[in-house]
Image (cartoon, rainbow, N blue to C red):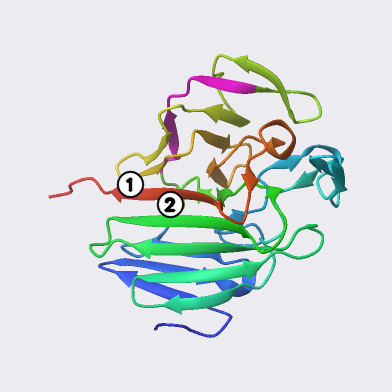
């Protein structure tokens, strides 16, 4: 097991790839270096964090479970955003050279007992990364979502080419003035984006830094949020449902039916021979 102090987290290695996970920072992927090149944004908003037990904005901090209405802290204007576990300390359940498992119990302000688990696995040849999230209840059933919010660097080096985002979606969720989906499906529009897209065959989006690296984010899930409104980074966020999904597309987690979502990142570098 390769575990460093909490300033560095859990370090995984395969070939020339190094991945650092910070269990003290929500089991966030804090750094991904390929051949010495950092792919994830550093600083205050850094790495790739887990969104659970909901993704994006939950409208006005409210959701229902059957006849019961619950209120969540409104930490994004009028809304509650990105779940409750991204700043919590997680437990490292196991780790070896190329994989690790992390767990976090759900707690206030989430009103239900449960647990979130993240499995992180580097390919042995250093060609990719598999991520798996599970949300389970340890009591009553509840609606939930899960996903990831990675901050990929817009440029991999000073003066380098900017990342180009490539994807094909069946439709885009129209976003209202309150930043929530209106329920209307529209043709995918050009960016910049802070928008949810539907991909019925599964998520597939590619970031290309011309001449330097190509990275593909894929998932069996049908939902992805693309966010590229900041100059430093771009985000491709596979998630199990759309923003405000606790209200519009509730997925019930029961004692016999946990929620699971997986995502794969693969990359390749141009042949410079």
The image quadrant of residue 18 is bottom left
Query: Which is nearer the N-term, disc 2 or disc 1?
Result: 2
17 up-or-down from 77: above or below: below
Viewer-side residue, 235 vs 65: 65
User: To which residue does mark 1 refer?
Assistant: 213
The reply to whether residue 193 is in sight is: no
* Numbered range of the magenta stretch: 161-173
Identify which residue is drawn at 63% across, 49% down: 253
Question: Dot 1: within a 10 Å radius of its alpha carbon, few (fewer than 14), some, or many (20 or more) residues?
Answer: some
The image quadrant of residue 5 is bottom right
Rendering coords of residue 76 (x, y %)? 81, 45
Q: On the picture, is 268 further left or further right than 9? A: left
Badge 2 marks a residue whose secondary structure is loop
Rendering coords of residue 250 (x, y %)? 67, 37
Identify which residue is drawn at 49% across, 84% down: 4
Farthest top residue in view: 187
User: To which residue does mark 2 refer?
Assistant: 156
Q: CA distance from mark 2 to mark 1?
A: 9 Å
Q: On the picture, is 222 further left or further right than 35? A: right
The reply to whether residue 217 is in sight is: yes
Badge 1 marks a residue whose secondary structure is strand
Is residue 222 in the magenta section?
A: no
Viewer-side residue, 243 vs 12: 243
Please report contact status of discs 2 and 1: CB closer than 8 Å, yes or no.
yes
Q: On the picture, is 176 further left or further right than 50? A: right
Identify which residue is drawn at 39% across, 49% down: 264
């Amino acid at each position: 097991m390769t575990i460093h102090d909490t300033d560095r987290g859990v370090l995984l290695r395969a070939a020339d790839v190094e991945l650092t996970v910070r269990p003290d920072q929500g089991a966030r992927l804090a750094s991904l270096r390929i051949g010495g090149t950092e792919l994830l944004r550093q600083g205050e908003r850094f790495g790739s964090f887990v969104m659970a037990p909901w993704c994006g904005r939950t409208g006005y901090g409210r959701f229902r479970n059957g006849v019961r209405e619950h209120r969540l802290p409104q930490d994004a204007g009028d809304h509650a955003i990105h779940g409750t576990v991204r700043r919590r300390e997680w437990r490292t359940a196991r780790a070896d050279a190329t994989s690790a498992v992390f767990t976090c119990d759900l707690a206030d302000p989430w009103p239900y007992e449960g647990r979130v688990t993240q499995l992180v696995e580097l390919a042995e040849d250093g060609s990719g990364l598999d991520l798996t999230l599970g949300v389970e209840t340890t009591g009553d059933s509840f609606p939930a979502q899960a996903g990831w919010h990675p901050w990929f660097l817009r440029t991999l080096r000073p003066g380098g080419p900017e990342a180009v985002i490539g994807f094909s979606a069946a439709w885009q969720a129209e976003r209202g003035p309150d930043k929530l989906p209106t329920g209307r499906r529209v043709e995918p529009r050009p960016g910049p984006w802070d928008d949810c897209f539907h991909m019925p065959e599964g998520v597939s989006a590619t970031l290309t830094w011309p001449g330097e690296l190509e990275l593909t984010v894929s998932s069996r899930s049908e939902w992805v949020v693309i966010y590229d409104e900041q100059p430093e980074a771009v985000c491709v966020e596979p998630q199990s449902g759309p923003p405000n999904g606790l209200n519009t597309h509730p997925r019930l987690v029961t004692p016999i039916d946990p929620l699971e979502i997986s995502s794969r990142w693969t990359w390749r570098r141009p042949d410079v021979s």
